[in-house]
Image: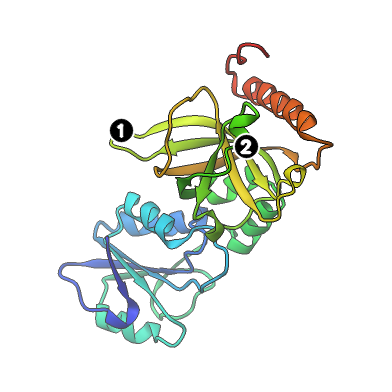
Amino acid sequence: MKINDWSQVQKTEGPLTLVIADFDGMHLGHYNLLRQARKRGHQIAVLDTSVKKERLLTPFHHKKELLESFGIDFYYKKSDEENIRQGVETLAPLHVIIEEENSAVRDAEVFSIQHVSAPEIRTLIEEGKVEAATAKLGRPYAMKATVTRGQALGRELGFPTINLGGADEYVNPAPGVYIGSLLIHEETPRSYYVLISAGYRPTVKGTTYKVEAYILDFQEDIYDRDITLSFLRHMRGEVDFDGLDALVEQMKQDEIDAREVLGLQQRKGD
């Protein structure tokens, strides 16, 4: 996928279909637009009109991966001052597809985005309603990041966790514990179930929001590896426990409950 600013747009060789939308969340509505574009049978370009936010549903490095998996050929990012119509005239696409709220281009093909909105999805995630967010996104809410070293407290407590570097770009799920899945990006990708702890860690006097994951039935060292962490189900809210012993007991129960939900064999000793 070739990436350019809208100010650098040029006519491409061969017929082209252009999709114009606010690609903040990469949700079901966007997939509908892209499917419509694919039906035209030409090269596909997207013009992303999303505005910069402090935290995103889909930061660019993650958005790029999703668009490439959909077979998009060209990606353009528009700044506020750039003219959409002028750029469209220069690009000269055979088809232009827009969401129904967008009126920037005359004679475009207008399609519904199924009443899905990024602000609505952001709210669901911030409230911990990740199952409902999945239904709107068409995929589990996920963070693509790099595994970094932490304080190794989880290992001392019998629950070694991985820490996510770069997760601060994403919308924060409500503090709590979630069942999730982890994809390790390597030549042959591997996937595992995880317990995710997201929040401020009040029991250990944490002060900043942090995302950690305990990988079920896994013993390897994956520091500095690229991973995608998906939030599948909310289990409970964050609790300020009365000491580490109480925290460990709850973590043991969380794992028992998660394994029961997932249909996995219980860990020996539980």
| Residue 113 x %, y % | 52, 60
Spatial CA span between label 1 and label 2: 30 Å
| Residue 81 x %, y % | 44, 88
What residue is disc 2 on? 153
Position of the N terminus, as image quadrant, is bottom left
Residue found at the very far left of the displayed protein = 13
Residue found at the very far right of the displayed protein = 242
Q: Residues within 10 Å of mark 1 (few under 14, many from 20)?
A: few
Q: Is residue 220 above or below residue 226?
A: above
What residue is disc 1 on? 188
Q: Residues within 10 Å of mark 2 (few under 14, many from 20)?
A: few
Image position of 76 (left or right of 101): left
Element at label 1: loop
Residue found at the very far top of the displayed protein = 268
Image position of 14 (left or right of 108): left
Name which residue type carries label 2: Leu
Q: Quadrant of residue 152?
A: top right
Q: Nearer the viewer, residue 226 or 20?
A: 226
Q: Earlier in the sequence, mark 1 or mark 2?
A: 2
Please identify, in this view, whether the residue under mark 1 or under mark 2 is nearer the observer: 2
Name which residue type carries label 1: Thr
Q: Nearer the viewer, residue 71 or 94?
A: 71
Q: Nearer the viewer, residue 83 or 255?
A: 255
Element at label 2: helix
Q: Is residue 258 above or below residue 230?
A: above
Q: Is residue 234 above or below residue 120?
A: above
Q: Residue at x 54, y 72 (%)?
A: 101
Asked if the residue under mark 2 is in contact with the one under mark 1, i.e. CB atoms within 8 Å, the reply is no
